[in-house]
């Protein structure tokens, strides 16, 4: 270990430990690419099941790979294929009316120190039906192992599935075998390792590939993947609330977006897209009783290496695909149904901002809740050709366009650290969920250990506890201090569909994730949903930790499998506004009580203020970020950025008070416009550049206006309120000029850019006089 590090530094000829070397950067790039590919190979495994492509699933295993399904062990791709096929039988997604939707969600992946193997924990679901009446549901946890080939391709070494609950549709799922649970399975990571997906200590392996080749481009790909994944996931959260205005804005101001819903229609342009959304999911907004949850899983993102000439102003393009499970209906009308679909989307980056180009939603089975999907549901067979994305083209030994970059190694390292922050944030988010699943005295200390010493965390229906020590004590107050060897019921805490905003220096992040709560016991299961709004930080030891955790619950529930989400009675109007406080509130009072939080934030939540809102009533949905394309704040004023208790109540708990940057809340919009002069008598030409951040965010940073004959710069300070007017040089030659206005970004704000062109008389491209 030590030897390779020394070798590396000798090879790099760098004597200073702190200096960024190309080798170390290349090493880090390939490690992060590895993490992504491991997640993609697993998501692809799930995506293939929807089409019964068991041979292709088996081909994702290493030649000696093993599938451990409960106590059954199957070795080698050929045997795995045979087993998968036999296990699915007619529930294979291929026969008419059949369904095999498998999801692997909420990854927590740790690479080995040498970067050649990895372990990953996932939550799993599987919904199956044969179209002839038979159904099967299964849920459990995967603990997988991965390894990389000589050629740099990641393969599955071991898939270890621990089935925890199962059942047919009619009776719902229950604990496998009606048994109690032990701690199944053990975690492959320690609490410390949960926040370190790429282990520290080894700087690189000599000869790891062409040093520095295409690094700038590969880092840009990783950063762009983060943006595209956020965009796809943000889409889902707007869809859930039928915020069609917000969804429309995700297509940007170009008017030729396309929405295709298979067997429903193809809808184009802003009006068309709205019509398509309404036809498939109903009118704008949610009214009492309406559920429109469209859960997104297994999103694979691929950045294209070329842009499509036909797409105007395209800087870069990308595609994403994944699985969608819809839980929809109208309780007042007595309707409820399941929707199992896949989606394929294309994206374009314009002026540095990613936006949707088109979305295809392909429903495979849509079924009435009371009937279930056993007989194939109510939609005709899908007509969309499922195009899986080739996720194996990232990385050193793979064909990737190589472009020189003028950016310094320090700058590239900073950008890369932002993608590592995305990974660290997702890991620690899922670590939290996995510990809470098995919460008891022992898990309390693990759960607390993934918090920073100055973190704050909400205990549901009570309030926030500040400091890791108090988080721990609140937990042990509620769950005791000893391990519980068995339990008869589990409420799982899945945190899928993250939207993650990493700070400019890559050391902090804000996260939104679902709380998706499948529950099981010995008789029957249920599902319910809430929302997490968290912040994470990179600590002094290089480990990602929770900084702040807010839980908004529940937005929708089921009381029983039989009745589903449509069978929940409206809460008695005469019932008290709030139930009596949890015991915890008296026994170990929070540092900030939910019911003492002035303002709107906790209104309507149980334990919060005023009358709590309970499904099928519609509770207000909060957003911690702005629209990722338009930059607008959410409709209805439901905007609460950053750490929720810090925002209006406990600013001293905020991360900036402890040396971290506050992560951005959305894009920084830069607009360059021709401006009238300032009233002086001369007739110069002026261009004003405006930089628009989120509400309350201060614009500081450098604005540049640059073209072939123009190079102007201005340092914006708070007093400029995000605006500067430049006078163009008087001696510009005639003809066409393209000017780029850029904003450098700041500790808080993302960079931004805009283009403006002008044509002056006299030159070859002169258009004046038209
Ligand atoms: C590489 O990643 C490690 C953390 O895994 C970090 O400490 C180091 O600064 C990174 N180096 C570069 C050059 O990005
Ligand atoms: C698996 O094997 C163990 C030990 O032999 C046994 O206790 C357990 O019941 C088996 N589980 C299943 C699902 O068959
Ligand atoms: C669901 O099925 C039941 C029983 O067949 C039927 O009465 C009901 O109308 C169906 N609902 C929908 C939305 O199709
Ligand atoms: C979406 O746009 C991409 C890029 O132009 C194109 O390749 C794809 O065919 C389009 N899909 C649909 C459904 O329009
Ligand atoms: C970093 O590690 C040291 C040594 O293990 C420990 O004392 C310290 O508390 C850690 N820092 C944080 C923020 O956890
Ligand atoms: C806005 O929020 C309020 C309070 O939750 C709610 O009553 C109202 O229906 C919401 N309006 C829209 C358009 O969603
Ligand atoms: C108007 O703008 C010109 C060019 O930027 C500048 O020299 C002049 O001082 C400005 N006059 C006023 C009144 O601001
Ligand atoms: C315009 O004038 C500036 C300063 O006088 C000079 O540096 C620049 O080269 C000139 N540009 C052109 C296109 O003549």
Image (cartoon, rainbow, N blue to C red):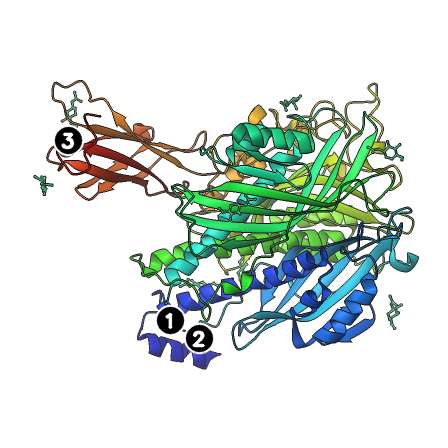
Q: Secondary structure at mark 2?
A: loop
Q: Is mark 2 within 8 Å of ligand 1?
A: no
Horizontally, residue 709 falls left or right of residue 382, namely: left
Percent position (x, y) of residue 186?
74, 65
Label 3 or label 2, whichever lies nearer to me, is 3
Q: Is mark 1 within 8 Å of ligand 1?
A: no
Residue placed most toward the observer, 597 or 520: 520
- Determine which residue is flagged by label 3: 761
Q: Residue at x 26, y 35 (%)?
A: 757
Snapshot quadrant of residue 339: top right
Is disc 2 in contact with disc 1, using a CB cutoff of under 8 Å?
yes
Percent position (x, y) of residue 419?
48, 55
Tell me if residue 153 comes above or below residue 638 in the rendering. below
Precedes in sequence: disc 3 or disc 1: 1
Q: Secondary structure at mark 3?
A: loop
For marks 3 and 1, give the CA distance: 49 Å
Tell me if residue 608 comes above or below residue 561 in the rendering. above
Percent position (x, y) of residue 320?
56, 50
Horizontally, residue 527 falls left or right of residue 599, namely: right
Q: Secondary structure at mark 1?
A: loop
Percent position (x, y) of residue 134?
89, 52
- Determine which residue is flagged by label 1: 211
Horizontally, residue 234 falls left or right of residue 690, namely: right
Is disc 3 in contact with disc 2, using a CB cutoff of under 8 Å?
no
- Determine which residue is flagged by label 2: 208
Q: Residue at x 81, y 25 (%)?
A: 332
Can residue 621 be seen?
Answer: no
Viewport quadrant of the C terminus: top left
Precedes in sequence: disc 3 or disc 2: 2
Horizontally, residue 42 falls left or right of residue 727, namely: right
Q: Quadrant of ligand 6?
A: top right
């Amino acid at each position: 270990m030590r030897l390779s590090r020394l070798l590396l530094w000798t090879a790099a000829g760098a004597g200073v430990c702190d200096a960024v070397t190309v080798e170390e950067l290349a090493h880090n790039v390939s490690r992060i690419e590895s993490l992504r590919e491991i997640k993609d190979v697993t998501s692809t495994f799930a995506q293939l099941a929807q089409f019964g492509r068991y041979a292709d699933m088996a081909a994702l295993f290493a030649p000696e790979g093993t599938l451990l399904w409960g106590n059954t062990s199957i070795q080698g791709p050929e045997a795995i294929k045979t087993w998968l096929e036999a296990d699915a039988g007619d529930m294979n997604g291929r026969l008419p009316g059949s369904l095999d939707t498998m999801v692997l969600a909420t990854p927590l992946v740790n690479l080995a120190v040498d970067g050649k193997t990895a372990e990953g924990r996932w939550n799993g679901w599987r919904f199956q039906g044969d179209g002839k009446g038979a159904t099967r549901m299964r849920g459990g946890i995967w603990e997988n192992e991965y390894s990389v080939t000589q050629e740099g391709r990641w393969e599955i070494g071991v898939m270890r599935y621990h089935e925890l609950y199962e059942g047919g549709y009619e009776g719902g799922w229950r604990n496998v075998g009606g048994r109690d649970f032990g701690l199944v399975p053990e975690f492959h990571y320690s609490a410390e390792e949960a926040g370190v997906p790429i282990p520290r200590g080894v700087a690189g392996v000599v000869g790891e590939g062409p040093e520095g080749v295409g690094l700038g481009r590969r880092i840009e790909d990783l950063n762009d993947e983060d943006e595209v994944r956020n965009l796809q996931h943000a889409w889902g959260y707007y869809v859930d609330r039928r915020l069609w205005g917000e969804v429309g804005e995700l297509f940007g101001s170009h008017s030729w977006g396309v929405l295709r819903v298979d067997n429903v229609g193809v809808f184009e342009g802003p009006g068309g897209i709205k019509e398509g959304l309404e036809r498939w999911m109903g009118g704008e907004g949610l009214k009492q009783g309406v559920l429109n949850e469209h859960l997104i899983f297994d999103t694979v993102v691929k950045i294209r290496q070329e842009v499509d000439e036909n797409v105007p102003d395209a800087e870069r393009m990308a595609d994403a695909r994944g699985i969608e499970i819809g839980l929809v209906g109208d309780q007042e009308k007595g309707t409820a149904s399941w929707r199992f679909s896949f989606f394929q989307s294309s994206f374009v980056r314009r002026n540095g901002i990613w936006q949707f180009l088109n979305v295809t939603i392909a429903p495979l089975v849509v079924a009435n809740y009371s009937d279930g999907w056993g007989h194939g549901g109510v939609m005709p067979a899908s007509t969309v050709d499922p195009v899986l994305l080739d996720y194996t083209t990232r990385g050193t030994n793979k064909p990737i366009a190589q472009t020189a970059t003028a950016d310094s190694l320090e700058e590239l390292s900073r950008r890369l650290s932002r993608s590592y922050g995305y990974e660290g944030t997702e890991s620690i988010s899922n670590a939290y969920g996995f510990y809470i699943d098995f919460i008891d005295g022992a898990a309390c200390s693990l759960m607390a250990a993934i918090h920073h010493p100055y973190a704050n965390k909400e205990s549901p229906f009570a309030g926030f506890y500040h400091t890791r020590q108090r988080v721990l004590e609140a937990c042990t107050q509620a769950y005791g201090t000893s391990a519980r060897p068995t339990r008869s019921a589990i409420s799982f805490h899945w945190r899928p569909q993250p939207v993650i905003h990493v700070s400019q220096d890559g050391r902090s992040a804000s996260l939104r994730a679902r709380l998706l709560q499948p529950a099981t016991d010995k008789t029957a299961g249920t599902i319910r949903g809430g929302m997490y709004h968290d912040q994470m930080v990179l600590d002094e030891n290089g480990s990602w930790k929770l900084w702040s955790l807010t839980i908004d619950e529940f937005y929708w529930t089921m009381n029983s499998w039989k009745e589903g989400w449509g069978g929940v009675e409206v809460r008695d109007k005469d019932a008290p506004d709030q139930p009596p406080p949890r015991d915890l509130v008296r026994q170990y009072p929070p540092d900030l009580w939910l019911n003492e939080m002035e303002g709107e934030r906790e209104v309507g939540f149980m334990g919060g203020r005023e009358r709590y809102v309970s499904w099928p009533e519609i509770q207000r949905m909060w957003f911690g970020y702005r629209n990722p394309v338009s930059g607008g704040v959410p409709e209805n004023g439901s905007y609460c950025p950053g750490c929720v208790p810090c925002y209006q109540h406990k600013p001293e708990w905020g991360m900036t008070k402890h040396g971290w940057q506050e992560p951005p809340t959305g894009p920084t919009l830069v607009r360059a416009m021709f401006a009238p002069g300032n009233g002086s008598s001369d007739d110069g030409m002026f261009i004003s550049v405006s930089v628009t951040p989120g509400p309350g965010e201060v614009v500081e940073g450098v604005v540049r206006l640059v073209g072939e004959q123009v190079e102007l710069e201005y340092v914006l300070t708070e007093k400029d309120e995000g605006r500067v007017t430049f006078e163009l040089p008087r001696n510009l030659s005639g003809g066409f000029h393209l000017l780029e206005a850029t904003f450098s970004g700041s500790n808080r704000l993302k960079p931004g850019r805009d283009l403006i062109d002008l044509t002056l008389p006299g030159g070859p491209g002169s258009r004046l006089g038209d």
